[in-house]
Amino acid sequence: MRYLIASAITVLIIAGGPTLPAQTLAAGSGTTTRAAGPLMVRHIIGLENISSQKSGSLTVQNGTMQFSGGKSVANVPVTSIDAIFVGSETTQSGGKVGRVVKTAAMAAPYESGKVFSLLMRTKVDILTLSYRDTGGAMHAAIFALPIGQANDMRTKLVAAGAREGASQELKERAQQ
């Protein structure tokens, strides 16, 4: 009976593996493209009046970067952004349900629960912004985006008037 339950859990996790709904694979390109609609992100830390780990949408419109998470909204003027940094990170997927399944899977026979830890990992892009408020104080905000979306967001921000940071200054000096 115990083996039957462990096998059923294995099949469920493999068949219904972690996916990001706002992400699709472009045919033949091997890169991801975002589906139509607002970019769904997770605010890690840094925006005023927005709680840590809040999920919401990130948009760039009319010279303003806006994060909307339910009733909470934060606006940052794009021209006040001094630096944009992009990276990637591996995180555990599945949220609270994933943690429960992972914990339950540790009771699986022959240490097969360790495989679930490998299956329940997903990569995300990390977007870090450095900006100044109206008083001139420096702030930073960190967002987790679906894989392949951080560079697109950086491009949108730069096109709207944000500065890329130290690398941009070095490029400008090299051109002079």
Image: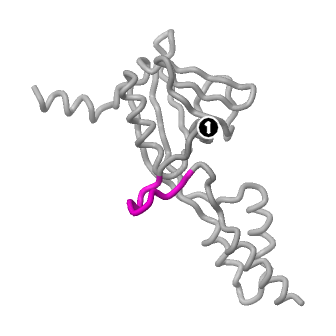
- Rendering coords of residue 86 (x, y %): 42, 43
Numbered-mark total: 1
Residue 78 location, quadrant: top left
Residue that label 1 marks: 43
Q: Residue at x 54, y 37 (%)?
A: 142
**Residue at image location 42% in from the left, 40% down from the top:** 152
What residue occupies the far left of the structure in this picture? 176
**Which residue shows up at 40% across the image and 23% down it?**
160
Most frequent secondary structure within the magenta stretch:
loop
The quarter of the picture where the C terminus appears is top left
Mark 1: give few (<14), some (14-19) or many (20+) Cα within 10 Å: many
For residue 2, which quarter of the picture? bottom right
* Secondary element type, mark 1: strand
Hey, which residue is sitting farthest front in the picture? 27
Left or right placement of residue 30 versus residue 71 in this view: left
Asked if residue 175 is positioned above or below residue 78 in the image, the reply reads below
Q: Position of residue 89 (x, y in %)?
A: 51, 54
**Which quarter of the rendered picture does the N terminus lie within?**
bottom right
The residue at the point 51 percent across, 46 percent down is 34
Residue 4, percent across and down?
84, 88
Relative to 157, residue 27 above or below = below
How far across and how far down the image is residue 155, in percent?
38, 35
Q: Is residue 58 left or right of residue 78?
A: right
Question: Horizontally, is 16 left or right of 158 in the view?
Answer: right
Q: Which of 30 and 176 is in front in this view?
A: 30
Identify the residue at the far right of this view: 1
- What is the quadrant of residue 119 in the picture? bottom right
Span colored in magenta: 23-32
Amino acid at circle 1: His
Let me know if residue 25 is in the magenta part: yes
Looking at the image, residue 138 sits to the left or right of residue 163; the answer is right
Asked whether residue 162 is drawn in magenta, I would say no
